[in-house]
Image (cartoon, rainbow, N blue to C red):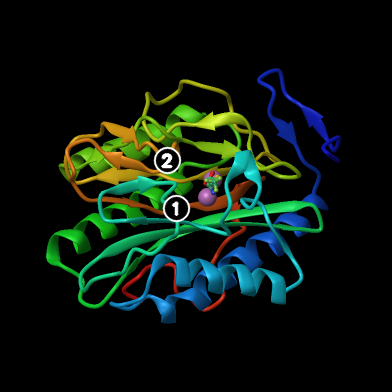
Amino acid sequence: MDDTRGRITRNGIRIYEDADFAGMRKAGEYAARILDDVAALVVPGATTAALDDFIRAEIERHGVTSATIGYKGYQHASCISVNHVVCHGIPGPKVLSDGDILNIDVTVIVDGWFGDSSRMYVAGNLPRKAERLIQVTHDALMVGIEAVRPGATFGDIGHAIQTYVEANRMSVVRDFCGHGLGRVFHAPPNVLHYGRAGTGAVLEEGMFFTIEPMVNLGRPETKVLADDWTAVTRDKSLSAQFEHSVGVTADGCEIFTLSPAGKFHPTY
Ligand code: MF3
Ligand code: CO
Ligand code: CO
């Protein structure tokens, strides 16, 4: 894989060049556009396999590549995580019911750059408790993104997210984290969504990574089902997640996976 750009910090985190932001911007926009366009299909009665079929066809139609098909044996163009599924839900024959909430996570490769994003959707009418969970999870991602600037630490990001979520009496999942990306899908560092301010590696301009907090209405513990992918909340409580791919700039960050249609939040 062509991953020899820029330099690597002593924490193993690659520093990309100014010109590399354009590659990430383009990859991120493809991922975001596909997440925009699948929204119309999220209705009661639809199967998660039908949503994945659409995503796969869109990826093909755009002439880009799915990062997940073939990744560690994974066979699908998306992960679709419904209700108490925390992440890595496998699309299949499951039929969506009124009031189901779901995360759809898509990663595409465009000219060698990885664009990774996920959002929440609702089939039919959004239940009150789910609405609050989705709002807090969305805002937790944004609070994390606001902490991104050169000189801050990864612990500052996690601390901002955890503090926000727990102030709203919800819990942050510890078992999965964000990740560096760029010309590869997963690279250092692990981006934790909890932690202490001032700890962890220092952010530098040119770092590319995801922030993708998973938030539960109940306890934070998860377990992985026998399919070796599907992660669920141990207490069966509802879970939500939002993910952006970002790059650190001189004075903050650029979000690569912004929705072209302004549809990132499900109640747009
Ligand atoms: N897109 C997921 C992430 O945010 C990874 C999915 S890997 C898969 O890192 F194989 F489950 F698709
Ligand atoms: Co990711
Ligand atoms: Co993802």
Q: Is mark 1 within 8 Å of ligand 1?
A: no
Which numbered disc, 1 or 2, marks the residue that appears first in the sequence?
1
State the image coordinates of residue 173 (x, y, percent, origin top left): 32, 36
Q: Which mark is residue 90?
A: 1
Q: Residue furthest top?
A: 10
Tell me if residue 68 comes above or below residue 199 in the rendering: below
Frontmost residue, 32 versus 16: 32
Name the mark nearer the viewer: 1 or 2.
Answer: 2
Q: Quadrant of residue 115?
A: bottom right
Q: Is residue 178 visible?
A: yes
Dot 1 and dot 2 residues touching (CB under 8 Å): yes
State the image coordinates of residue 255 (x, y, percent, origin top left): 58, 56
Position of residue 180 in the picture relative to residue 158 (left or right): right
Quadrant holding the C terminus = bottom left
Query: Which residue is located at x 72 percent, y 41 percent?
Result: 184
Alpha-carbon distance for marks 1 and 2?
A: 9 Å
Q: Which residue is mark 2?
A: 227
Name the kind of residue labelled 2 in the image: Asp
Name the kind of residue labelled 1 in the image: Ile
Q: Quadrant of residue 2?
A: top right
Q: Is residue 259 visible?
A: no
For label 2, the SS is: loop
State the image coordinates of residue 155 (x, y, percent, origin top left): 45, 27
Position of residue 247 in the picture relative to residue 160 (left or right): right
State the image coordinates of residue 235 (x, y, percent, origin top left): 17, 38
Tell me if residue 223 comes above or below residue 55 in the rendering: above
Query: Which residue is located at x 76 percent, y 71 percent?
Result: 63
Frontmost residue, 129 versus 234: 234
For label 1, the SS is: loop
Other residues around mark 2 within 10 Å, as few (<14) / some (14–19) / many (≥20): few
Query: Which residue is located at x 71 percent, y 77 percent?
Result: 61
Quadrant holding the N terminus = top right
